[in-house]
Image (cartoon, rainbow, N blue to C red):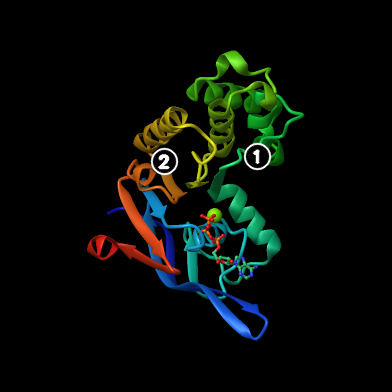
Amino acid sequence: MARALLEMRDIVKSYQVGDEEQIILDHIDFTVDENQFVSVLGPSGSGKSTLMNIIGCLDMATGGEYCLAGQLIEDMDQTELARIRNKEIGFVFQSFQLLNRLSVLENVELPLIYAHTPTHERRQKALEIIDRVGLSHRIDYFPNQLSGGQQQRVAIARAVITQPSILLADEPTGALDQATGRAVLDLFKELHREGRTIIMITHDASIASAAQRIVKLLDGRLYEGEAANA
Ligand SMILES: Nc1ncnc2c1ncn2[C@@H]1O[C@H](COP(=O)(O)OP(=O)(O)OP(=O)(O)O)[C@@H](O)[C@H]1O
Ligand SMILES: [Mg+2]
C-alpha cells in the first residue's frame, strides 16, 4: 500500500475583500501518495499558487484539515511551520530564485548550511547532486552566467539536496523555451523514477502530461479522472 504523504480534507481558502468574502479554494480534497508525480492544471487565477502556498506551508487554509507527512498543519505555530517546511518540501519556482551573489555550488549548498550540516558532508552532497543535474562543469559560475535551463537545474538541485518528501514546483518551465522546458520535465521524470514525490503546477496541458496523474483546478474546485474531462 502506498503511503499518503499529503492529505487535504475540505480545504477552504477565502479572503475578505471589502464586504465580500472571496472564496479562492472551495472545499478541496486532495491526497498525494509517496512517489507520485502529479500535475495541478488550471487557468490563470484558478487558485494554483494559493494551493501551492498552502501545500508548502507558506500560507494557511481558512478551513479544513491538512496533514503533511503524518503531521497536522492547522495547529502549528510559525516556528513549527518553518521546521516542517524545511524538512518536507523542496520548492522550485518559475523565476528560479537563485542568489545572484553565490556560485552554483554555494546556491546548492545553502539549504544544508541552514540545516547545520558539516562542511565536508555538505560539499560532497552538493557536488553529487550538481553532477546529477549535469552541471559539474559550472560549479563556480554565478547564476547570471548560466542559461535559464541551467539556472532551473541549479534550483532543482537546491530543492532536492535536503531529501524533502515532496518536490513542489510552480510553473517550473514558465520562463523557458520549449526545448529547455522539456529537458527540465525530463529531469523531473528521472527524479520521479528514482523515487521522489513531485507536485507540479502549470496552466499548460502539454506540460502537465509529463506527470502520471493530472488534477484540474477550476474556479477553486479540484477535478480528477472522468470529472476532469467533462
Ligand atoms: N490576498 C488576496 N486577497 C484577495 N484575493 C486574493 C489574494 N491573493 C490571491 N487572491 C485571488 O486568488 C485568486 C487565485 O490566485 P492564484 O495566485 O492562486 O492564481 P493562479 O492559479 O496561481 O494564477 P496564475 O496562473 O496567474 O499564477 C485570484 O483571483 C486572486 O485575485
Ligand atoms: Mg500562480
Q: In screen coordinates, is 5 left or right of 174?
A: left
- Which residue is outermost to the bottom? 19
* Residue kind at label 1, given as amino acid type: Gln
The relative height of residue 222 versus residue 202 in the rendered view (above or below) is: below
* Residue kind at label 2, given as amino acid type: Arg
In-front residue for pair 68/182: 182
Q: Which mark is residue 196?
A: 2
Residue 5: x and y, percent? 42, 55
Residue 139: x and y, percent? 63, 18
- Which residue is outermost to the right? 101
N-terminal label among 1 and 2: 1
Quadrant showing the N terminus: bottom left
How many C-alpha atoms fall within 10 Å of the one at disc 2: few (<14), some, or many (≥20)? many
Residue 184: x and y, percent? 45, 32
Q: Quadrant of residue 222?
A: bottom left
Secondary structure state at the residue bearing disc 1: loop
Residue 59: x and y, percent? 61, 63
In-front residue for pair 122/214: 214
Q: Which mark is residue 97?
A: 1
Q: Which mark is residue 46?
A: none
The residue lying at 65 percent from left, 39 percent from top is 97
Q: Quadrant of ligand 1?
A: bottom right
The residue lying at 48 percent from left, 64 percent from top is 67
Quadrant showing the C terminus: bottom left
The residue lying at 42 percent from left, 57 percent from top is 42
Q: In screen coordinates, is 67 left or right of 144?
A: left
Mark 1 close to ligand 2, CB under 8 Å: no
Secondary structure state at the residue bearing disc 2: loop
